[in-house]
Image (tube, rainbow, N blue to C red):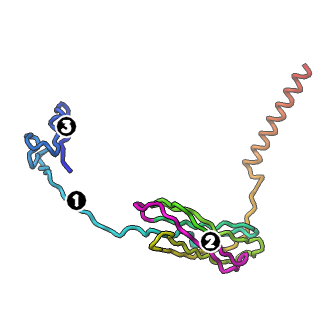
Amino acid sequence: MFYCRLDPPGIDTALVCDILCGSLPECEDPNWYSGNPYYDKDTLVIHVVESPPALYVLQDSIYYVDQGQTAAYIPFSICNGDPCADPQDYGYCITNKGWVGGPIVQCDTIEGVPGGECEDVYGVIDAGLADICDYDTLTIIAWSVALPVIYDTCVQLIHVVESEPVPLFTAPVVTILVLALVLAAAVFMRRRAVSRA
């Protein structure tokens, strides 16, 4: 590290202080500027902290599934927590209690998760026959493929809710439809008038 002087207008840039400037009068220690002393020494305090976990799983605490969904995708994120780490391969298994759609065991591997990034994986639940307010718990266990093996696990609650219908004829949709009909009628009438002429 070194210090330098900001050049006021009209001052030659050759007078800027750097680490090799010991012979220049502008580089006296302390260097006085606006009545304040500035020194060529400083202290940088480095505090070593524990690195982030090399593997962790993120998920919502509760996930709502619409009643009647035959393939509800429940997301989990498997993360390579160390931003300085090389890409890692992870295995995972997602299981449930079987209260919604029967028991599942879904296992797979994701490859090359970069350091400091996450990849999404999904547990797939069949809620086609579930009742409103049914619930289940999904458990995911993720582990590193490389040695030493590390792992993380978490549990997510899913809750079956009534599906809400999508309104087709809202005010903006009706307005657009009316405008489209008016424009189509205008084009049709113009063509008819041209053909008669």
- Under circle 2, the secondary element is strand
Residue corresponding to mark 3: 7
Q: Quadrant of residue 91?
A: bottom right
**Would you call the spot at circle 1 few (<14 residues within 10 Å), some (14-19), or many (20 or more)?**
few
Q: Which mark is residue 171?
A: none
Amino acid on which disc 1 is placed = Leu
Q: Which mark is residue 44?
A: 1
Inter-mark Cα distance, 1 to 2: 48 Å
Q: Is residue 83 magenta?
A: yes
When the figure is inspected, residue 60 is found, relative to residue 103, above or below; the finding is: above
**First in sequence: mark 1 vs mark 2:** 1
Position above or below: 174 against 96? above
What residue type is disc 3 on? Asp
Residue placed farthest to the top in the image?
Answer: 197
**Residue positioned 84% across, 27% down in the render:** 190
Q: From the image, which quarter does the C terminus lie in?
A: top right
Residue extending farthest to the front is 147
| Front position among marks 2 and 3 | 2
Front-most of residues 117 and 10? 117
Query: Badge 2, how many Cα within 10 Å: few under 14, some, many 20+?
Result: some
Asked whether 180 or 160 is in front, the reply is 160
Tell me which segment is drawn in magenta: 81-107
Marks 2 and 3 in Cβ contact (< 8 Å): no
Which residue position holds label 2? 107
Tell me where residue 37 appears, x and y as whole percent.
Answer: 11, 50
> Three-letter amino acid code at disc 2?
Cys
The picture places residue 195, in percent across and down from the top left corner, at 90, 22
